[in-house]
Amino acid sequence: MINHFRNHYELTRKDLLIKNLKRMQRSLIRDERTAEADMFDFFPLTFVLPADYGLFVEEFKQQQGAIWIMKPIGKAQGKGIFLFNKLSQISNWKKDSKWRPNTDRALEGEPQTPQAEAYVVQKYLEDPLLIGGKKFDMRIYVLVTNYQPLTVYLYRSGFARFSSSRYLINKNTLADTYIHLTNAAIQKTAPGYEKDLGCKWPLHSLKLHMISLYGMDETEEVFLGIQNMIINSLLAVQKVIINDKHCFEVYGYDVMVDDALKPWLIEVNASPSISADTQADYELKYGLLDDVYTVLDPEGLLEDEIYEQVGGFDLIYHNGPVRPEKGSKQVSRLGCFDDRARNLKRLFKQHSKAAAGASANK
């Protein structure tokens, strides 16, 4: 078993993720499937630099006063990210970034032209949903065991990552990463950071808090929207991913919600951190890994059966969306109470009963 498909970066590299989402959206529009195309409005306005620099400048001029965020395409943990609202503020990126040779020209024997390190630039989400006056995003775990047919499991547990400083957006705070970036690697270095408490909140607690503020229906719409967003992002790369029955992926989806309760996809991580900051974090990551291997079943104990619930994982797509029972409303179990130990006992009891029945029929 290998924990990456060969070209997994089609989803997990920031520039290729946007390219594939835009391509899928254009394809649906060409086919006059506008309702489906409208479901791909979950990523911010994005350009890839330096390739799209001219297009970006034109858009920048049309949105005077807007705030933008620059992210290197191949880095993680918040490294190299910065905010700006003036074109002059990215001149240092051109001067100080690493320059690399143009390999296409080198192969053709032409003089090499230096290129700036590739970044994505996105319109910054200036109105995020706040809790206690602080910005947060969600880390959500997704297991893909197959791309042909697409088979997707969503983990119920996850966490919200909070900034250490109260959210304030103006020209004087653009450089303050402790306000704008929720990455745990950055927040750990913030003044006053308490190691025992960390900067994370269980997804279940976040969902309960949102229900108390906005009600069950609106909160459920948010979490179901996140689930559909995950499925659509995977469908966007399904045809380009090189499928291999020996491979699987555990993705770490980073999602934000704005103050209108609209979810936005920030990025998808190919190798989400499994290090733990607190005891609760350790229990989450330990349970996650245990359930991943139960689904993968390397020992063949489940005999290739597909179960809709395995520990903390819920099957949400298997060659099509997993539909609720007839007469039931479509809901997402993301953020719901995760009694994974009880679920595993039920699974093995169910499997043992089925295996005994099969043995008796021989």
Image (spheres, rainbow, N blue to C red):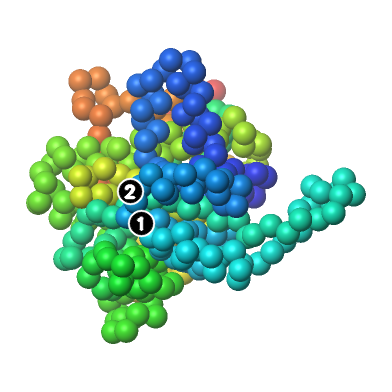
Crowding near the residue tagged with mark 1, few <14, some 14–19, many ≥20 C-alpha atoms within 10 Å? many
What residue sits 33% from the left and 25% below the top?
A: 323
Report the number of discs.
Answer: 2
Residue, disc 1: 67
Q: Quadrant of the C terminus?
A: top right
What residue sits 45% from the left and 21% below the top?
A: 29
Upstream in the sequence, badge 1 or badge 2? 1
What residue sits 26% from the left and 73% below the top?
A: 165
* Disc assigned to residue 156: 2
* Disc assigned to residue 103: none
Along the line of sight, which residue is nearer the eye, 296 or 174?
Answer: 174
Quarter location, residue 196: bottom left
- Tell me the SS state at disc 2: strand
- Tell me the SS state at disc 1: loop
Mark 2: amino acid: Arg
Mark 1: amino acid: Ile
Q: Is residue 72 above or below residue 107?
A: below
